[in-house]
Amino acid sequence: MTTTSITNFRKNIYKMMENTVRYNEPVSIATKDGNAVMISQEEYNSLVETLYLNSQPGMRDKLLDGLNTPLEDTVPEEEVAW
């Protein structure tokens, strides 16, 4: 994460915004009244989706179970009734 002052952020807003969008590099912006963090929309959407999935009862355990399941123990996609 890049950390900068509000003054430096104002001077370099385009480059910092470009790096945030292109490389998902968050920017912490320090002001005298507190700090703010700028993240890309892609990163924001990912965080919101993660929070949503973790808020669903049992979903976290199902996701972890899926991550720990060997590929050979899964059902081939062509056998799944979508």
Image (tube, rainbow, N blue to C red):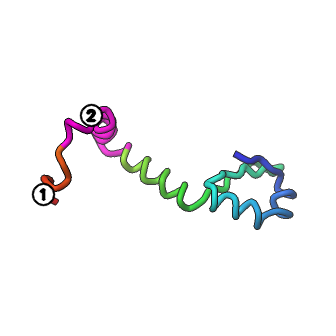
x and y percentages locating residue 29 in the rendered image:
76, 52
Going by the numbered disc 1, the residue's amino acid type is Ala
43 left or right of 64?
right
User: Is residue 59 magenta-colored?
Assistant: yes
Q: What stretch is highlighted in magenta?
A: 54-74
Q: Which residue is drawn at 12% across and 57% down?
A: 81
SS class of the residue under badge 2?
loop
Q: Which residue is drawn at 30% across and 42% down?
A: 59
The mark closer to the camera, 1 or 2, is 2
The reply to whether discs 1 and 2 touch (Cβ–Cβ < 8 Å) is no
Q: In which quarter of the image is the C terminus?
A: bottom left
- Mark nearer the N terminus (1 vs 2): 2
63 left or right of 51?
left
Q: Which residue is drawn at 49% across and 58% down?
A: 45
Q: What residue is shown with label 1?
A: 81
Judge the density around disc 2: few (<14), some (14-19), many (≥20) Cα neighbours within 10 Å. Answer: few
User: Is residue 69 magenta-colored?
Assistant: yes
